[in-house]
Image (tube, rainbow, N blue to C red):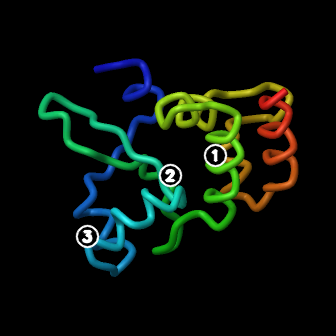
Amino acid sequence: MSNVESLVGEWLPLPDVAELLDVSITKVHSLIDERALAALRVGERRIRSVPAAFIQDGQVVDSLRGTIVVLADAGYSDEDLIVWLFTADDSLRGRPIDALREGRKTEIRRRAQTLAW
């Protein structure tokens, strides 16, 4: 298991994401292409999967897309941005993904924007 795999913990294969969101697998691919979600190939079989924490109450975490876009614009790969989102930060009292899930997007976006400098 790679560092990013263990850091995230729970991963969802794309068909499971489609089921949770009640959309087609094609729509899940579109969400990834549109940067609303980020996915990596994980596990022994290298199945393209999304961190389970990206889904909340049957929807993609509300402020995730903008944060992914900011991080991608700063030059972060999907793996880099997932690591950033899931790495605990003492000044946040947790991980950036947890703050996004709690609705604290402004604080996270501001931090993500500083990474571009």
Q: Amino acid at mark 3?
A: Ile
Residue at horizontal 22%, vertical 32%? 43
- Crowding near the residue tagged with mark 3, few <14, some 14–19, many ≥20 C-alpha atoms within 10 Å: some
x, y percentage for residue 112? Answer: 77, 38
Above or below 93: residue 105: below
Q: Nearer the viewer, mark 1 or mark 3?
A: 3
Answer with left or right where residue 115 lies relative to residue 69: right
- The residue labelled by disc 2 is 53
Numbered circle sitting on residue 25:
3
Marks 1/3: CA–CA distance: 24 Å
Residue 9 lies left or right of residue 36; in this view the side is: left
Look at the numbered disc 3 and give the secondary structure of its residue: helix
Occupied quadrant, residue 86: top right
Q: Amino acid at mark 1?
A: Ile
- Contact between marks 3 and 2 (CB within 8 A): the answer is no
Q: Are marks 1 and 3 in contact (CB under 8 Å)?
A: no
Point 52% across, 32% down: residue: 77
Q: Are marks 2 and 1 in contact (CB under 8 Å)?
A: yes
Distance in Å between CA atoms under marks 2 and 1: 7 Å
Amino acid type indicated by mark 2: Ala
Q: Secondary structure at mark 1?
A: helix
Residue under the point 33% across and 79% down: 23
Q: Is residue 26 above or below residue 13?
A: below
- Residue at mark 1: 97
Residue that lies at the very extreme toward the left in this rendered image: 45
Q: Residues within 10 Å of mark 1 (few under 14, many from 20)?
A: many
Q: Earlier in the sequence, mark 1 or mark 3?
A: 3
Counting from the top left corner in percent of width and height, residue 85 is at 62, 37
Whether residue 96 sits left or right of residue 45 in the image: it is right
- Residue 19 position (above or below residue 116): below
